[in-house]
Image (spheres, rainbow, N blue to C red):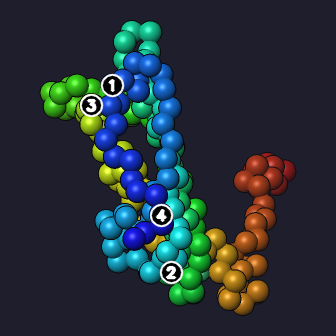
Amino acid sequence: MSPLPKAVSQVDVWQLARKGETLQGVFALSGCARLLEGMLAQPVDRVVEWSLAGQTGSLGQQWLTLQAHAQVTLQCQRCLSQFDLQLRVDTRVQLVSNEEELEADGADEDPDTPDRLLGSTHFDVHALVEDELILALPYVPKHEVCPSLPKALVEAHGTDTRRASPFAVLADLKKD
Ligand SMILES: [Zn+2]
């Protein structure tokens, strides 16, 4: 019934990492029920484009780099008009093979520790892409500059008010 491409779902991410391969795909935005929940109705031809690149490090660590983008229509919470936003995902995760590794010490404390993902031979790429797009959604969607705001208000927010440098003030004090 739908002319839109179906989701590619089952991927062997271990093989992807071992071979250093990249997969690409497109699926219909309308298939992302969790992402679209509570959102405005989206144009039916919207798609999500993604690529998933596997990599194996010199010590045998295995990585996935996920990139995805989709255009979504949101309602600006400042002026209440609709606007289009490009959601972009670019994330790198380390593959682990069991739950223990997933929860190993240091995963949360050390900001340098990469996010970990439980690998699978039939990994659901669609769900991962949707999860990451949800994380990329702005908490409060709004225009950078609302088109309908009065010009004076926009300029008041945008101008860099110049204040006297504290050093200049000190220099003045020393003169006394
Ligand atoms: Zn706005």
**Which amino acid does the dot numbered 2 rest on?**
Gln
Check disc 3: other Cα within 10 Å, few if <14, some if 14-19, many if 20+. Answer: few
Residue at image mark 4: 4
Residue 2 percent coordinates (x, y): 43, 69
Residue at image mark 1: 14
Q: Earlier in the sequence, mark 2 or mark 3?
A: 2
| Displayed quadrant of residue 153 | bottom right
x 44%, y 80%: residue = 40
| Displayed quadrant of residue 57 | top left
Q: Earlier in the sequence, mark 1 or mark 2?
A: 1
**Which amino acid does the dot numbered 4 rest on?**
Leu
Label 2 close to label 3 by CB (< 8 Å): no
Q: Nearer the viewer, mark 1 or mark 2?
A: 1
Q: Nearer the viewer, residue 69 or 162?
A: 69
The number of discs equals 4
Q: Nearer the viewer, mark 2 or mark 3?
A: 3
Check disc 1: other Cα within 10 Å, few if <14, some if 14-19, many if 20+. Answer: many
Q: Nearer the viewer, residue 86 or 120?
A: 120
Q: Nearer the viewer, mark 4 or mark 1?
A: 4
Q: Earlier in the sequence, mark 4 or mark 3?
A: 4
Q: Earlier in the sequence, mark 3 or mark 1?
A: 1
Q: Which mark is residue 121?
A: 3
Q: Earlier in the sequence, mark 4 or mark 1?
A: 4
Residue 44 percent coordinates (x, y): 49, 74
